Image (cartoon, helix red, strand yellow):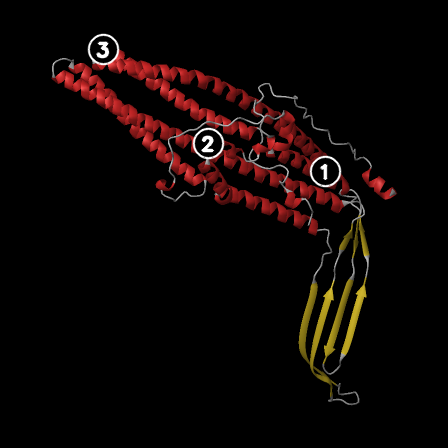
Amino acid sequence: MVLTASALGGCAVHPVRTPAIALPPAYERPAASNAAPFALDRWWTLFGDAQLSQLIDAALIAAPDARRALAVLAEARAERSRALAAFDPQGSLTASAKGQHQEISGIGSLPGAGVQLGAGDSTTLAGGFSPSWEIDLFGRRAATARMAQADVQAAQFDYEASRQSLAADVALNLFEARGLAVRIQQARDTLHILRGLADLGARRAAAGIGARADADALAADAATAAADLSALDAASAVSRRSLLVLVGRGADPLDSLPIAADLGTPPAIPATAPAELLVRRPDLRAAEARLASAIGRLTLDRLALYPTMNLLPTASATRNTGPVDYNTSLWSIGAGLTLPILDRGRLLAQIRAQDARTEQAVIAYEAAVQRAYGEAENRLTTLAADQRRLTDLQTAEGRARAAFGAQQKGYRVGIIDLTALLTAERTWRGNLAALTGLQVTTLRDTVDTFKALGGGWTPDTAGAADKDMP
């Protein structure tokens, strides 16, 4: 070990800094629900929406993004096996066969001159085996195993994060499509009302009891509503196609994805603590695994200064048949010791570089934790504001609807002028559009909150298949 200590001289070995990831004990805007935190695993089931659950479950199986993420995970597992195989015995069998014709003639001045000696055909068969095997004196294999396992875990958590995002994207797109379906239904109802008023205005103008300008204004309002409906129809088609692509059914007809004009009510968010983000967020778990991988690489770089020893056995056999038959065999065993002396400067520089990369991984993990906490806090705050605004807008839309209804009745009997009617109608339509938009926003913010809190996967089972090293 004196040689080893000499080899490591000048290499300052210090522990990796512990990440600063302390989080508050509670959120400033905590969720009020008493639902169990494990309900976050499959948060979409909390909506009680069969279509939502079916689309997400289908996307997690068949969507291109999900299949690509699985392929990346398979690559990481294969790379782990390849890295560990380097410590298994190496080597290959060799075999050869050779046939030859030989004539040996006696020299004329010697007795027996002119007589062929040993003439004939011969065949030589040879085989050999030259393996090598590193004797792991200082734990290189264990360090490589830890590093490779950390790489696989990072890929596993990236896989879960991609599935988590896919589930959220499906829900966001579905709620967007449903919001458009609701707006289309509202636009049709509004168009029906406006066309009725335009027809009434035209009849009153024709009878001489109403102004032609009023009739034209009502007709223009109806035409604008019809144009808005056409734009909504196009937006709905685009939204449904995007949703089909997302779930892996991009070539299916739009009619295969019916969208109901019903937004429903978002579920309550289960109460959780900020510290649960460290376990529930797959992106944080991936950052933690990458830090473990960086530490493993640093350990391997430090071990590169230690000597390596290899066993070098060989075995070979040869058989010759022909005029002269003979067999030969040979075996040997040896050992090789390698100590990097002239490479010392390069290896020390590599250690310093990896030490810096490890510190970067520590910082990246710290930043990811802070970012995750900020996202969760902001989502909870935004969702709470949505719910308060929703109550106010529901009240405003109800009163605007009642006012427009009263103005319609007054206009039909001639006690309300057109200006008051159109003002009431536009006020109601504005409130209705704002309410529908906020309902969609609340649903989408609910989905984003579930995702920010780490919902959409099961942390306890993630990576279970990689728990045991191959």
Residue sitting nearer the eye, 429 or 22? 429
Badge 1: residue crowd in 10 Å (few <14, some 14–19, many ≥20): many
Closer to the eye: label 2 or 1 = 2
The image's mark for residue 326 is none
Percent position (x, y) of residue 30? 58, 21
Q: CA distance from mark 2 to mark 3?
A: 43 Å
* Quadrant housing residue 287: top right
- The three-letter code of the residue at mark 1 reads Leu
Q: Could you tell me which secondary element the residue under label 2 belongs to?
A: helix
Instruction: Please report the residue visible at 48 percent of the width from the left and 45 percent of the height from the top.
Output: 62
Residue 128 picture quarter:
bottom right
User: Disc 3 designates what residue?
Assistant: 417
Q: Residue furthest left?
A: 207
The residue indicated by pointer 1 is 298
Under tag 3, what secondary structure? loop
Residue placed at 20% from the left, 13% from the top? 413
Q: Nearer the viewer, mark 1 or mark 3?
A: 3
Label 2 is placed on what type of residue? Answer: Leu
Determine contact: label 1, label 3, CB under 8 Å: no
Specify the quadrant that holds the N terminus.
top right
The span from disc 2 to disc 1 (Cα, nearest Å) is 42 Å
Q: Look at the image and tell me whether residue 364 can be seen.
A: no
User: What residue is rendered at 73% in x and 37% in y?
Assistant: 351
C-alpha separation, residue under disc 1 versus residue under disc 3: 82 Å
What residue is pinned by disc 2?
A: 172
Judged from the image, the secondary structure of the residue bearing numbered disc 1 is helix
Residue 469, percent from left and from top: 69, 47
Q: Amino acid at mark 3?
A: Asp
Q: Position of residue 233 (x, y in %)?
A: 32, 32
Tell whether 74 sits left or right of 227: right
In primary-sequence order, the first of circles 1 and 3 is: 1
